[in-house]
Image (spheres, helix red, strand yellow):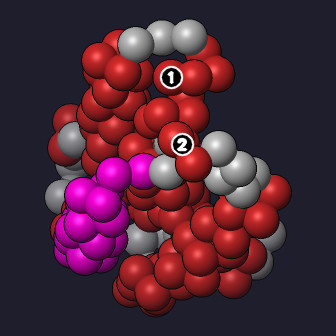
Amino acid sequence: MSFFIRLNISSFLYALFPFAGIELMANVYRLSRVTGWGLDHVNVVILVFSLVGLLLSGYGFPKLIRHWLGGRKTSFFSLLLWIPYFMILTYIVAAWFPIIDPADKPNPVTGLIAIAVLALYPFYLAILHLFGTTPIPEGMEEDQVT
């Protein structure tokens, strides 16, 4: 598989994590209505999902960069390439699952949280890319480094 295809697939994976977290936050009332859970329970589930996603991405993205993208410096292009995939995913969900019930509209603060997440996410990815492109010292296996 060519590097270009692997770079785009990894960029799609990068877009998937903030997309899932933001969509879950924006659809708290809908999830509560559909599942029958209380708002507190839905919020706890979303928080756990977000923290697990943060931990998995923090561990998995450097491994993905090192092994699948070869630790190349050109993998830093994915710091910009995830944005169109995020926009496409958001458009698809908004078009296929519109908010019909006015009670399902998210709180205004959800937008501020989404802006903060999207503003900080490129820095998080850049730090993970630095770990993924750093060469492994001689005589050490990767399991000893990470």
Q: Is residue 33 among what the camera can see?
A: yes
10 Å neighbourhood of mark 1: few (<14), some, or many (≥20)?
A: some
Q: Residue at x 50, y 57 (%)?
A: 19
The residue positioned 19% from the left and 44% from the top of the image is 145
Tag of residue 32: 1
Q: In the picture shown, does residue 30 fall above or below 25?
A: above
Query: If the image is split into quadrants, where does the C terminus sit?
Result: top left
Nearest-to-viewer mark from 2 and 1:
2
**Label 2, residues with CA under 10 Å away: few <14, some 14-19, many ≥20:** some
Q: Is residue 14 above or below residue 80?
A: above
Magenta part of the chain: 106-125
The percent coordinates of residue 114 (x first, y second) are: 32, 63
Observer-nearest of 27 and 104: 104
Tell me residue 17's x, y (percent).
46, 52
Which residue is at a point 64% across and 22% down the rendered structure image? 34
Q: CA distance from mark 2 to mark 1?
A: 9 Å
Secondary structure mostly taken by the magenta-highlighted segment of the chain: helix
Q: Which residue is mark 2?
A: 104
Up-down relation of residue 61 to residue 87 (above or below): above
Q: Specify the quadrant that holds the N terminus.
A: bottom right
Quadrant in the rendering for residue 76: bottom left
Image coords of residue 22 (percent x, y) = 43, 53
Q: Is residue 115 left or right of residue 45?
A: left
Residue 123: say if magenta.
yes
The numbered mark at residue 14 is none
Labels in figure, total: 2
Could one spot residue 128 in this view of the protein? no
Of the residues shown, which amino acid type is indicated by label 1?
Answer: Ser
